[in-house]
Amino acid sequence: MLNDAPSNAAASGAADKIRCDACPVMCYIKPGATGACDRYANHAGELVRVDPHVVLERTVSHGGQIVPFQKVGDWDGNIVGRDKVFVTAIGAGTTYPDYKPAPFIVSSEVDGVDMVTVVTEGIFSYCGVKVKIDTDRYLGPETATVRAQGEAIGHVMTSEYGSQMLSLGGVHHLTGGSKKEGRVTCDALMDLSNGKAVELAIDGGATVVVQAGKPPIVNGVAEERMRVGCGSATIGMFAKQWFGKVDEVVVVDDHITGVLSEHQAGKLLDIPDTGIKMKGRRSTPGRYFQVAEPGTGWGGTNISDPLSILGPFDPKEAKAGMRMLMVSTTGEHAAYFELDEALKPVEKALPTDLQLSVERIQENCEPALCTVLFMGGAGGSLRAGVTDNPVRLTRSVKDTLTKVTSGGAPTYVWPGGGITFMVDVTQVPQGAFGYVPTPALVAPIEFTMPLADYAALGGHMDHVRPLSSLKDNTEVLRHGPAQDESGQPA
Ligand code: SF4
């Protein structure tokens, strides 16, 4: 069985084909076939939405399950259950052009207040994903082009404390390049948003496999740990634990390499100078920038020999037998040295107590993950499906009278103009994102507000329907996976 078609979606085409008008592509669909996006089909002469409409149970946020809508009578549609379910836009369908009311405008009572949730699968030509990759390894220069299947789909952004950020998609890549660039960009965004792995190649940098909620795979190697902090922070955290066990510690880091004897943490512990000479640019005492080039070696640098970042020890301070630990910010690399008579560091076996300190660094590193945030602008024409006076919806969102969710997941709405939101795709039920070949992504979006506010902002009040009216509306085909968040907005 298939889901309901959007109102007024079908219009007669040639012979037995029917025409879908749920997006600008306006497919003619043969009986038994689906349209170009695989979301709508001609089912016995009727235009239907292929996927089930998903309703979330409020208990999901407490570890419960997503309930596919009307699955074997889980919910009978009566008033008792209505404050326990949240009508998402997943599978709800789209409307085009936007002045038509959204597919479902559903009223319910929550804690004694009449609420309304307006749901639609928005078509986002202006959208992208922001990717956070927990790794110190060098992925590529800032602003470098990120490619999928050879096509430019985004660029490298900034490095943020142990993570590398990518910006993918956006209207430039979706519509501003070749047809193939737009299609590949759309596919990559949809796969990433639906929690699938996508291989990305960075110009002048690495190849990285990105999958939301999973470790990144950089040049074929799965990343394990996110660094505990920069080199300076690591010195600050562990200085006391090194005190008395070693004379010098260098925490190698592509961004800020820390040196214990010079660092304020060492000074407070009265650790004497060691005559160490660091390469790179000294920022403040015990903190060095640019000790090496970025890379996939020690601490996100390109070095495999840590001694390569040291100059000769100053004989006025250094003494034969002085002990030195060099370690990376993840504890993945560590080496122990003692100075010989010529004040040259000679590598020796790592003493047990220092091994424990390296393990403590490792223990304090969080697992490296990829995070994917879908970002879309819902401040445009989509608003007309909610209200006759779109700017009032924007104001209502900004005034926090209207809550914006995506597939039931909480969103962050950017300050400033429009309704530009971000959502963690791991919070959205899998498979919630689709596409149309314009190309554009299709993403669920729900607006929830008190019914009185909806009337005041010029909502389509004649299309408001009670939650219980959905009971006979559809039959569900699939189960959604359990997710962390859902339910009526707080
Ligand atoms: S691409 Fe999909 S939504 Fe658009 S007209 Fe074709 S079937 Fe309908």
Image (cartoon, rainbow, N blue to C red):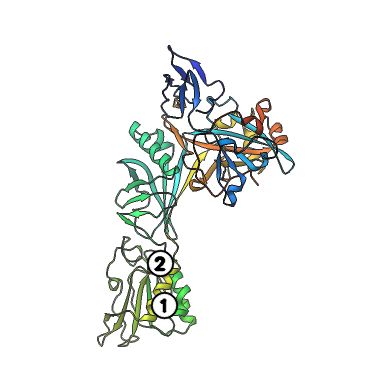
| Number of callouts | 2
Amino acid bearing label 2: Ile
Residue at horizontal 43 percent and vertical 49 percent from the top: 212
Residue type of the residue flagged with mark 1: Leu
Above or below for 101 versus 378: above
Mark 2 Cβ inside 8 Å of ligand 1: no
Disc 2 secondary structure class: loop
The residue tagged 2 is: 256
Foreground: 372 or 314? 372
Question: How crowded is the residue under tag 1: few (<14 C-alpha within 10 Å), some, or many (20+)?
Answer: many
The residue positioned 71% from the left and 33% from the top of the image is 456
Q: Is residue 106 above or below residue 130?
A: above
Residue matched to label 1: 260
* Viewer-side residue, 462 vs 301: 462
State how far apart marks 1 and 2 are (Cα): 13 Å
Q: Which image quadrant is residue 254 in?
A: bottom left
Q: Is any atom of residue 19 visible in this view?
A: yes
Name the spot of residue 7 as percent of width and height, x first.
Answer: 57, 23
Say which quarter of the image contains residue 99. top right
Image-based side of 457 in relation to 225, left or right: right
Residue 461 in the image: state x and y as whole percent. 68, 28
Quadrant hosting residue 78: top right
Q: Secondary structure at mark 1?
A: loop
Q: Is mark 1 within 8 Å of ligand 1?
A: no
Residue at the limit of the structure toward the front, as seen here: 72
| Relative to 128, residue 249 above or below | below
Furthest residue to the left? Answer: 342
